[in-house]
């Protein structure tokens, strides 16, 4: 039985007056996206709209998502009893849905968008996480007056008050840039993936993720975490409009991974701080597309290894100085380690990453 409209706060304001735009990027993951949408449209914040950008999935993803919005398709219900109530029973349908191409979404001359709750954007190609999300961010910047954008992974589901806590923390924080959520695993949902963010050490090329694999509800020192992190985990990034206007969008040099680190570093140069909203709870499947959840010795992890290595080298190259000089020594250390452990598939992925990085460097000599 569907929840009646009066039982949850749907979007009633015109699009131009909305305070928050929630942005999801879909790539051959419409089932995850639909479950995420089901949780989003039961949030307690009254003024938001959701955009879904599709990176040329070629599997009918946007049609499936539209079918769900019109009440023709149901979301998959998580097996865990704690998560099932976040997506069932279904919110009332139909939702007001609108579809655009990438050029239409980014067209400033077209003026403000009409009233609707769900916007579906066909990006037309797959140029990665940053470029795919940037289509939606440009649409938000050029065709709306939204004060905030919430960049959220499509393989997540959220608690009803997740957005409200992000807004509250962003308004409390002095000169906020990116605000993060508490990320919990789908299975088990009582284990943390991250408390907001992490600290990335450019000298070692390693990240320390705060709260990783710890119990979901430990005593938290929110301000200590905010002081310690130098980036917010990319699965949930809440940004104000002035951050987008001054810092710009995510770097499209990075196909996958390191976008959030690069964004935070650039934001810091403009005086923006990072924030963490502990009570903004987001459940994250993690790595469903790239295989990052597989053990290091698993050959299915090679896509993750290739992209994260390429992006790490590009990010370090942009930092300049001694950090740039460490790129090749670090690479050969990773390569030798893979060969020593007999992980030939990982070694091949690293070589592919190096070749892709060298092509990028030839195209961008001024950045290196």
Image (spheres, rainbow, N blue to C red):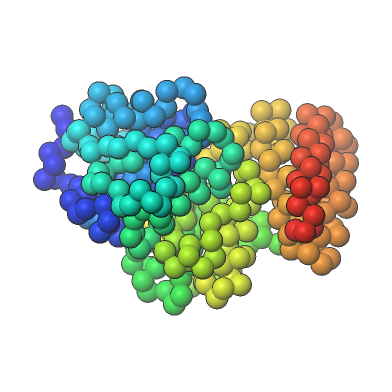
The residue closer to the viewer here, 103 or 286, is: 103
- Of 253 and 37, nearer the camera is 253
Q: What residue is rendered at 41% in x and 52% in y?
A: 108
The image quadrant where one finds the C terminus is: bottom right
User: Going 53% across and 56% down the picture, which residue do you hit?
Assistant: 249
Comparing 242 with 278, the one in front is: 242
Lateral position of residue 255 relative to residue 139, left or right: right
When the figure is inspected, residue 121 is found, relative to residue 243, above or below; the finding is above
x and y, in percent, of residue 88 in the image: 25, 34
Residue 73 pos. (x, y %): 28, 24
In the rendered view of the protein, which quadrant contains the N terminus? top left
Asked if residue 103 is positioned above or below residue 258 in the image, the reply reads above
Q: Is residue 338 left or right of residue 2?
A: right
**Residue 163 appears in view:** no
**Above or below, 121 relative to 216:** above
Residue furthest out toward the front: 109
Query: Could you tell me if residue 17 is visible in this image?
Result: yes
Q: Count how many numbered circles sit on residues in the image.
A: 0
Residue 71: x percent and y percent? 23, 28
367 relative to 221 in the view: left or right: right
- Between 200 and 13, which is closer to the camera in this rendering? 13
User: Based on the displayed image, in which of its 4 quarters is residue 287 positioned?
Assistant: top right
> In the image, residue 173 lies at what x, y percent?
42, 74
* Residue at the image point whose x is 38% and y is 60% from the top: 148
Q: Is residue 72 left or right of residue 153?
A: left
Task: Locate residue 32: give its quadrant.
Answer: top left
What residue is shown at x 25% (from left), y 59% (from top)?
17
């Amino acid at each position: 039985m569907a929840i009646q409209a009066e039982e949850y706060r749907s979007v009633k304001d015109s699009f131009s007056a909305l305070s928050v735009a929630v942005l999801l990027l879909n790539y051959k993951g419409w089932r995850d996206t639909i479950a995420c949408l089901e949780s989003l449209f039961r949030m307690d914040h009254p003024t938001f709209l959701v955009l879904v950008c599709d990176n040329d999935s070629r599997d009918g993803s946007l049609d499936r998502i539209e079918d769900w919005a019109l009440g023709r398709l149901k979301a998959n219900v998580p097996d865990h009893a704690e998560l099932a109530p976040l997506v069932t029973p279904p919110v009332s349908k139909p939702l007001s849905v609108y579809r655009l191409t990438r050029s239409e979404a980014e067209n400033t001359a077209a003026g403000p968008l009409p009233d609707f709750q769900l916007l579906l954007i066909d990006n037309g190609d797959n140029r990665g996480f940053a470029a795919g999300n940037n289509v939606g961010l440009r649409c938000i910047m050029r065709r709306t007056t939204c004060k905030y954008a919430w960049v959220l992974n499509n393989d997540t589901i959220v608690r009803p008050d997740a957005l409200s806590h992000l807004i509250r923390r962003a308004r409390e924080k002095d000169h906020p840039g990116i605000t993060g959520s508490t990320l919990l695993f789908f299975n088990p949902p009582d284990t943390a993936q991250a408390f907001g963010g992490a600290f990335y050490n450019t000298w070692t090329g390693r990240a320390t993720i705060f709260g990783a694999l710890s119990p979901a509800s430990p005593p938290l020192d929110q301000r200590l975490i905010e002081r310690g992190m130098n980036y917010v985990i990319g699965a949930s990034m809440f940004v104000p409009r002035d951050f987008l206007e001054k810092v710009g969008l995510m770097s499209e040099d990075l196909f996958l991974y390191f976008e959030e680190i690069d964004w935070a570093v650039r934001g810091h140069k403009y005086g923006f701080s990072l924030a963490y909203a502990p009570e903004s709870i987001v459940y994250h499947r993690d790595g469903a597309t790239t295989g990052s959840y597989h053990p290091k010795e698993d050959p299915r992890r090679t896509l993750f290894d290739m992209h994260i290595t390429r992006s790490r080298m590009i990010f370090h190259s942009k930092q300049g100085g001694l950090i740039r000089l460490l790129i090749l020594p670090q690479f050969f250390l990773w390569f030798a380690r893979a060969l020593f452990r007999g992980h030939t598939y990982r070694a091949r992925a690293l070589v592919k990453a190096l070749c892709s990085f060298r092509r990028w460097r030839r195209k961008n000599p001024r950045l290196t």
